[in-house]
Amino acid sequence: MRRFLLFLVLPALIVLGVLGGQEFRLFERGWFNLKAWWQPAEQGIGLDRYRVAVEALPVQGLDDDLSALTYDPDRKTLFTVTNARAELIELSLDGRILRRVPLTGFGDPEAVEYVGPNSYVITDEREQRLIRVRLEDDTAFLDAGDAEQLTLGIGRNGNKGFEGLAYDSAGKRLFVAKERDPMLIYEVRGFPHDNPGQPYAVHVLQDRKRDARLFVRDLSSLQFDERTGHLLALSDESRLVVELDVEGKPLSTLSLRKGYQGLKATVPQAEGIAMDEAGTLYLVSEPNLFYVFKRALD
């Protein structure tokens, strides 16, 4: 029966690829969906089994410009940034503002990532700067001039720069997503620099095979899952979260469109994603919406 359906679906996918064009990556996405249906991945997070638990909750006190998200396992809270009025904002796990810290000299802050106790990396999208800051309980403001910085300056393209971050604490790797034109994921080793006794050495790597497999139109955020070693890639334009295994192969997806994952409405502009130790997913969308997704019990 499945083989018969395969012969029926394949011509439709070919037509879809021609009509949609490479820009929309419709053929690649359709082909992945078909393969996932035909032979579901056994090892992975299983994003398709997640369901929305909190949908489109407005973050009170913010009217616009919410961008990025990271989970702090020490504080058991979330952090995000805004760029028009540059701030680092701490959120509770139910989407309430706990703290606001003004940012000075950060240019166009677009992403934030927890990299260790009281330690975070913030991106300056336009200048392609990575800025490592330390946040204590009594920190009143953060000045980029006092922070460790790394400027990559690779393929600059206006505001289509560094849009997402993810950190592998075991491998000491910082993943940096370039939004589009071209859409890339860089792997940065040696930043932040945590060992003063060792020389400062930064290596920037690319995995072109992995990036070519990404059947999305842009990248808005990244999340590294320490349990599996898999990377989650969030795309606003494709309304999708994609799980990539250690070799960069897509394994599962979570749709952000109405009718999928229990959503009553499409997520309007997904900007940031984070995951806690239990595997719960948190997502923010401009202008100020907060979402929680939890895996359904098997």
Image (cartoon, rainbow, N blue to C red):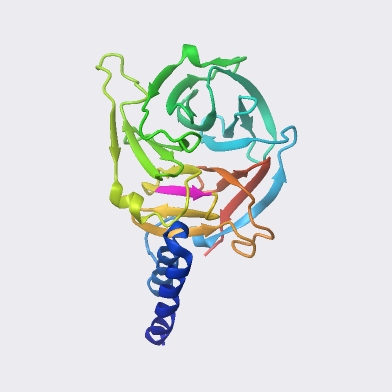
Figure quadrant of the N terminus = bottom left
Instruction: Answer above or below: position of 45 versus 106.
Output: below
The question of residue 124 being in magenta is answered with no
Residue 156 in picture, x, y percent from top left? 41, 33
Quadrant of residue 7 within the rendered picture: bottom left
Residue at 45% x, 22% y is 132
**Relative vertical location of residue 293 with respect to residue 76 in this rendering, above or below:** below
The spot of residue 5 in percent (x, y) is: 43, 84
Dominant secondary-structure state across the stretch colored magenta? strand
Task: Decide if residue 27 is on the left or right side of residue 63.
Answer: left
Give residue 142's position: percent from left, percent from top: 56, 16
Numbered range of the magenta stretch: 231-235
Q: Where is residue 107 in the image (x, y as percent from the top left)?
A: 53, 23
Front residue of 226/264: it is 264
92 versus 261 height, above or below:
above
Query: What residue lies at 63% left-to-right and 39% top-to-bottom?
Result: 93
Q: Which of 27 and 44 is in front in this view?
A: 27
